Image (spheres, helix red, strand yellow):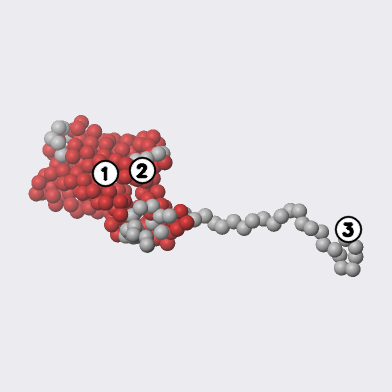
Amino acid sequence: MDRRPARRTAGPGLLAVLLGAVGIGPLLTYGLSATSDLVIADLGISAAQFGLLATACFACAAVGNAALGRLADRHSDRVLMTAVFVLAGLALALAAVPGGYWLLLAATGLSGVAQSFPNGVTNRILLQRVPAGQRIGWTGIKQSGVQASQLVASLAFPALAVWIGWRGASLLGAVLAGVLLLLTLRALAAVPPLALDAGRAGPSVTPAPATGTTPTRPPGGPVP
């Protein structure tokens, strides 16, 4: 009798961490935008300098996409998902350090790198671990992670900034990245890749008929 533990099916936990992986990278940029008046006043910078923060983020994301886009083909899901949350968490934690404008600029650049490869690894997880009937719907939900990040940042950062300042809000964002990382590792361990025949079975192929057929005798005639 087979006593191996039953495989858990892909459920809300896995979907939540895929959503989080897509949304955690841009959280810092959206959070800073939501508290821009406080950031500008605290650092004593101009509006143009503040705008450069988003420029640095998106520039690093673009470079990262070009340079790191093939990582999904070379490393495991655990390694890549860990990198996403660690980089985003470091960016948020770095922004919480009172080191001035240039340190914040570096933090936003790092958050851009964190946005470089979540799509590749999350798409692979969907392909390999989620049944075919769920993939299309899950892809749409997963891709809404950017909009979910905008919503969370626009609501949470201003409210937290009133209580613990914009740096405190950023630090809580780093804690969130750490929690999501732990949940991700747990979800990946609980939902292993599907068997090939269940998750990625290719179309069946019907053998072609043989080319050399035995000639048939015409009705009432001799064999040629």
- The residue that disc 3 covers is 224
In the rendered image, the vertical position of residue 222 relative to residue 172, given as above or below: below
* Point 74% across, 53% down: residue: 211
Q: Seen from this angle, which residue lies furthest front?
A: 1
Would you call the spot at circle 2 few (<14 residues within 10 Å), some (14-19), or many (20 or more)?
A: few
The tag on residue 76 is 2
In the rendered image, the vertical position of residue 176 relative to residue 87, given as above or below: below
Q: For the residue marked with disc 3, what is the amino acid?
A: Pro
Would you call the spot at circle 3 few (<14 residues within 10 Å), some (14-19), or many (20 or more)?
A: few
Please provide percent x and percent y for residue 198: 45, 58
Please provide percent x and percent y for residue 129: 38, 54
Spatial separation of the CA atoms under disc 1 and disc 2: 15 Å
Q: Seen from this angle, which residue lies furthest top?
A: 102
Q: For the residue marked with disc 1, what is the amino acid?
A: Phe
- Along the viewing direction, whichever of 215 and 27 lies nearer the viewer: 215
In the image: residue 37, left or right of residue 144: left
Please provide percent x and percent y for residue 82: 28, 43
Q: Seen from this angle, which residue lies furthest left?
A: 163
Quadrant showing the N terminus:
bottom left
- Along the viewing direction, whichever of 153 and 134 lies nearer the viewer: 134
State the SS at label 3. Answer: loop
Please provide percent x and percent y for residue 91: 23, 39
- Say which label, 1 or 3, has the lower sequence index: 1
